[in-house]
Image: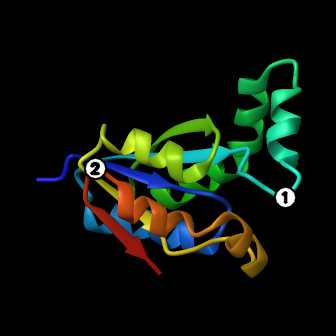
Amino acid sequence: MISSVLVPMDDSEMAEHALTYALGAFPDAEITVLTVVGKPSPLLGQQTAIALADDPEAKATERAQPVFDRARDLAADHDTTVATRVEIGHPARVIVTHAEDFDTVVIGSHSGTMSERLMVGNVAERVFRRSPVPVTVVR
């Protein structure tokens, strides 16, 4: 029985589909939405801005807030709540590290623009290949 689900979310439509799927497929599970900020980019812009902030954790939480607000709205549509967590780092690594604390991971198939996917790689694919728990990829 699945009692805890990790749903990595960014601001993409696919991430919203993943959360909606998890809410429907695992209605009795505790669902945690994980947002990873400071994703790699050619110039490491977000990571640098967060690292140079007076309070990196507060800056990361600020960047994650719109994603969490949307996640809470989707959960409310299912008459439930979700836990939220923000981390700083490379999305695939952070997700895989936290996956072992859950029964399963539900992740959107892709996000970002085509050039971002080519530069950074496909996070869903990396999580799928490296996760210590089952992964459902939603599109």
Mark 2, Cα crowd under 10 Å, few <14 / some 14-19 / many 20+, is some
Residue 111 lies, in percent from the top left, at 64, 71
Q: Secondary structure at mark 2?
A: loop
Residue 139 lies, in percent from the top left, at 47, 81
State the image quarter where residue 61 is shown.
top right
Question: Disc 2 marks which residue?
Answer: 132
Along the line of sight, the residue nearer the viewer: 83 or 7: 7
Side of 126 relative to 135 (left or right): right
Judged from this view, the residue extending furthest toward the top is: 54
Residue 71 lies, in percent from the top left, at 55, 54
What is the image's colouring? rainbow
State the image quarter where residue 105 is shown.
bottom left
Side of 15 relative to 98 (left or right): right
Task: Tally the numbered discs.
Answer: 2
Q: Secondary structure at mark 1?
A: loop
Give the spatial CA distance, label 2 vs label 1. 29 Å
Is residue 116 positioned above or below 34 on the image? below
Mark 1, Cα crowd under 10 Å, few <14 / some 14-19 / many 20+, is few
Q: Specify which label sits upstream in the sequence, 2 or 1.
A: 1
Side of 133 relative to 122 (left or right): left
Residue 22 lies, in percent from the top left, at 36, 63
Query: Label 1 is placed on what type of residue?
Result: Pro
Q: Are marks 2 and 1 in contact (CB under 8 Å)?
A: no
Question: What residue is at 50 percent from the left and 54 percent from the top?
Answer: 8
Query: Label 2 is placed on what type of residue?
Result: Pro
What label sits on residue 75 in the rendered view? none
Judged from this view, the residue extending furthest toward the left is: 1
Question: What residue is at 22 percent from the left and 52 percent from the top?
Answer: 28
What label sits on residue 42 in the rendered view? 1
